Image (spheres, rainbow, N blue to C red):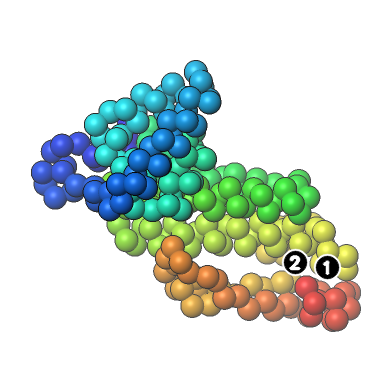
Amino acid sequence: MKLLSHLSPESARDGGALPLPADARLHALGQSAWDEALAEAGDAAAAAHAWSTTAAGRALLAAIFGNSPFLTGVAVREWAFLTSLVENGADAAFAAVIAETKRPIDDDQAALMSRLRVARRRVALTVALAELAGAWTLEQQMAALTRFAETAIDAALAYLLRATPGAPQPAAPPEESGLIVLGMGKLGGGELNYSSDIDLILLYAPTRAAPVAQDVLHGF
């Protein structure tokens, strides 16, 4: 249990204690929802039940449920992913999300949007728990949030290039399309946080996009 190894009594005595639940009622509601989700999953949730009933597991869930309704909802909904995160650590969990986000685009728009939403909430859960457990520094957290944003933008751009009539259709990835996406502010500086939006400027290289009418590109 790589993530839970950071939550031992020894680490708590050394100042690495998790935050206590600030709201007992939210804690109880979250725990009830968690128990219900695992009960519905039956034997498939055996691993999740095993770690979440240890002292360290209960402390981790209490820190989530009693302090963040958003993370509570994600943890309950993504109990299988959370179990993988606990068992394999934040680095492996984050790498898996990035790999899934980079998967070749074979979705329609609704399916791609759903895939990116799932990835976004899993990244949020990974980064938040890595922070709670002391597994990642602040710099690592910002780098992970920034990298996911860049990867999601790449996936969306690849889909748009394929699906938009009149858009450049490169044989190679979007890097060869002639479209340029500039990340401004915290995205450009690699400093995204949990509440950051992203500001983009889209440009195009006329020499590569010359066969396409400019009004098409301007509306892309």
User: Which residue occupies the foreground of this view, 154 or 124?
Assistant: 124
Q: Which residue is mark 2?
A: 177
Q: Which residue is mark 1?
A: 167
| Total numbered badges shown on the rendered structure | 2
* Disc 2, SS: loop
Q: Quadrant of residue 174?
A: bottom right
Classed neighbour count for the residue bearing mark 1: other residues with Cα under 10 Å, few (<14), some (14–19), many (≥20)? some
The answer to whether the residue labelled 1 contacts the one labelled 2, judged by CB atoms less than 8 Å apart, is: yes
Q: Nearer the viewer, mark 1 or mark 2?
A: 1
Quarter the C terminus occupies: bottom right
How far apart are the two marked residues, 1 and 2, measured between alpha carbons? Answer: 9 Å
The answer to whether residue 115 shows anywhere in this view is: yes
Residue occupying the point 66% across, 49% down: 114
* Disc 1, SS: loop
User: Which residue occupies the foreground of this view, 66 or 184?
Assistant: 66
Residue occupying the point 52% across, 51% down: 121
As drawn, is 69 to the left or to the right of 21? right
User: Which residue occupies the foreground of this view, 101 or 75?
Assistant: 75
**Residue 202 percent coordinates (x, y):** 67, 76
Q: Quadrant of residue 144?
A: bottom left
Quarter the N terminus occupies: top left
Instruction: In the displayed orientation, state which residue is furthest to the left.
Output: 13
